[in-house]
Image (spheres, rainbow, N blue to C red):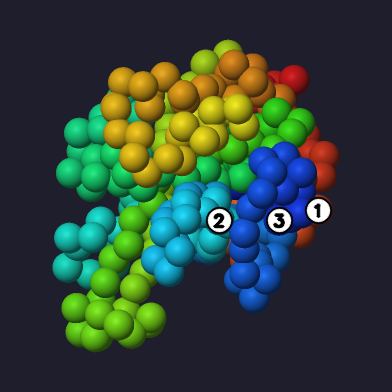
Amino acid sequence: MCGRFVSTTTPQDLVSLLGELRWDPAEALAPSWNVAPTDPVPAVLERVDRETGELLRQLRPLRWGLVPSWSKDPSGGARMINARSETVHVKPAFRKAFATRRCVVPADGYFEWREVPAEAGRKKYKQPYFLSTGSVMLMAGLYEFWRDPTRPEDDPAAWLATAAVITTDASDSAGRVHDRMPLTVAPDDLASWLAPDHTDSDELHQLLRRPADGALTVRAVPTTVNSVRNNGPQLLGPAPDPLGLAD
C-alpha cells in the first residue's frame, strides 16, 4: 500500500456505523482527500479511563507513521506508515503495539500509482488510481506513544501518539495496481480487535480481512493527487486510464 488515502467520514457517521463513541470536538479532523504520511489521521481505539477505570471506545487523531516507544527521536515515523501482517507480531517496532494497542483507521479508499512509459513527445509519469469498496473501510492499525525525553513526563507536549496501517499481499483487482493492500476489520469484530486484553496473536490475525475480499473498485484519477499540496474532492474526478487497469 502506498502512502495516501481519503478520509471524509465524520464522527457522527462512525457513531451510526459503530455505536457509542467518544471524541473531543476540538480534536475533530477536517475531511481530507489526500492524507499523507505524518498527517493526523482519525483512529478508533479503546483505552481505560484513568479516573473511572472504564474501558472507553474513542475517536482520536494520531500522527500517521508509527514511532516505537523506545525510539531515540520521532524522525523515523514517516517510514513506518505500514506494518506487514506477516511479521507484525514479531517485528520489534510493531509487536508490542500489536499485542495491546490496536485501532482502526476509517478511510473512503486509498491511492496507488503505476508508471506510464514514455512515448513520443511525452515523458514517463506516474498514473494514480483510487481503490475503494463503496463504503467506509475500517483499516486495521496499531498505535503507540512516544515521550520526548527532554520534557517532563507530566507535560502533555512531551507525548506523541502515532499509528501504522497493517497490510497484506494484494489480490484480485487491487493486485493489478500494487502488490500490497490494507487489511480491514469488520464492524462485528471490532470489539475483539480493539480489546487491550486480547493478546492471542493467532486469534487477532483471524480478525483481519481484505476489503471486499480483495475485489475493490479501481479507477484512474487526476495526476494532481500526486502532490500532497493538493486537496479536495476534485482529486477523485474522472481521468484517462492509459494502462487499462480501471474497472
Q: Secondary structure at mark 2?
A: strand
**Front residue of this view, candidates 116 and 48:** 48
Q: Nearer the viewer, mark 2 or mark 3?
A: 2
Q: Quadrant of residue 228?
A: bottom right
Residue at screen point 42% across, 40% down: 195
Quadrant assignment, res 210: top right
Separation of disc 2 and disc 1 at Cα?
A: 31 Å
| Numbered label attached to residue 12 | none
| In this picture, residue 36 sits left or right of residue 66 | right
Query: Residue shown at 34%/73% (left/top)?
Result: 159
Per the rendering, the mark at residue 234 is 1
Which quadrant: the C terminus? top right
For residue 11, the mark is: 3
Three-letter code, disc 1: Gln
Residue drawn at the location 52% of the way across and 54% of the way down: 56
From the image, state whether disc 2 or disc 1 is nearer to you.
Answer: 2
Say which residue label 2 marks.
Answer: 58
For image coordinates 32% across by 62% down, the residue present is: 145
In the image, 56 versus 234, the foreground residue is 56
Q: Secondary structure at mark 1?
A: helix
